[in-house]
């Protein structure tokens, strides 16, 4: 499928996503979010605000949470990208996803892929987080439904099983 006229200056870019190498034709300044969603069909990562403030677009870059709506795909290089579609294959990712289900965290669900990605990144560096650790790690993730209490409890629940 040819790219729209606005993307005529596209390059062939190789990315390591969820453990697999993918090649995409995209301009190097295209945000990773649009590469994931529009070019690769990985729609679990959501568009929220477009200015890296809400956290809905959170993915991992070499294990660290980043906002994909403002990350130019050309800046990624060899670093590994993990999306919500692949995080469940990791030990802490599977435990966080199970905790989310066990504690029925999700209400509308729109922000939850970003919430889960931030929670997994937290548990990878702080396996037994206290409330201040959770607050700091999750501060950039907005939930319009207000499921923050359930999110905190699910993170603690997952931490017990990590």
Image (cartoon, rainbow, N blue to C red):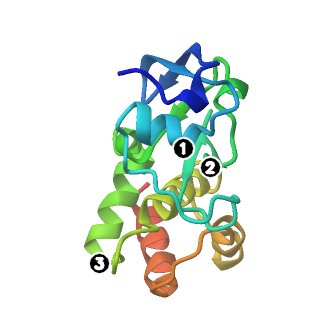
- Image height of 79 relative to 129, above or below: above
Within the image, what quadrant is residue 55 found in? bottom right
Q: Which of the pair 8/87 is nearer the observer? A: 8
Verify CB contact (< 8 Å) between mark 3 and mark 2: no
Mark 3–mark 2 Cα distance, whole angstroms, equals 27 Å
Q: Residues within 10 Å of mark 3 (few under 14, many from 20)?
A: few
Q: Position of residue 143 (x, y in %)?
A: 52, 78
Q: Secondary structure at mark 1?
A: helix
Disc 3 is placed on an element classified as: loop
Label 3 or label 1, whichever lies nearer to me, is: 1
Q: Nearer the viewer, residue 153 or 110?
A: 110
Q: Position of residue 156 (x, y in %)?
A: 49, 72
* Disc 2 from disc 1: Cα separation: 5 Å
Q: In terms of sequence position, does the residue under pointer 2 or pointer 1 come before the other?
A: 1
Q: Give the answer, above or below, for where 81 lies relative to 104.
A: above
Give the mark nearest the N terminus, 3 or 1: 1
Q: Nearer the viewer, mark 3 or mark 2?
A: 2
Q: Which residue is mark 3?
A: 104
- CB atoms at circles 2 and 1 under 8 Å apart? yes
The crowd level at tag 2 (other Cα within 10 Å; few <14, some 14-19, many 20+) is many
Tag of residue 33: 1
Which residue is drawn at the image coordinates 69% and 58% (left, top)? 52
Element type at mark 2 = loop
Tell me, for residue 137, which label it has, or none.
none
Could you tell me if the residues under marks 3 and 1 are in contact, i.e. CB atoms within 8 Å?
A: no
Q: CA distance from mark 3 to mark 1?
A: 27 Å
Quadrant assignment for the N terminus: top left
């Amino acid at each position: 499928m040819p790219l729209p006229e606005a993307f005529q200056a596209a390059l062939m870019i190789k990315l390591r996503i969820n453990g697999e190498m993918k090649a995409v034709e995209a301009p190097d300044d295209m945000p990773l979010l649009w590469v994931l969603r529009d070019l690769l069909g990985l729609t679990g990562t959501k568009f929220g605000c477009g200015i890296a403030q809400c956290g809905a677009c959170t993915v991992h870059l070499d294990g660290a949470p980043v906002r994909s709506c403002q990350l130019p795909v050309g800046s990624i290089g060899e670093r590994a990208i993990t999306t919500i579609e692949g995080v469940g294959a990791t030990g802490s990712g599977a435990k966080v996803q199970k905790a989310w289900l066990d504690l029925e965290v999700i209400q509308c669900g729109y922000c939850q892929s970003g919430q889960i990605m931030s929670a997994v990144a937290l548990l990878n560096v702080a396996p037994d987080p206290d409330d201040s650790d959770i607050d700091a790690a999750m501060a950039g993730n907005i939930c319009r439904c207000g499921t923050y209490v359930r999110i905190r409890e699910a993170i603690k629940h997952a931490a017990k099983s990590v």
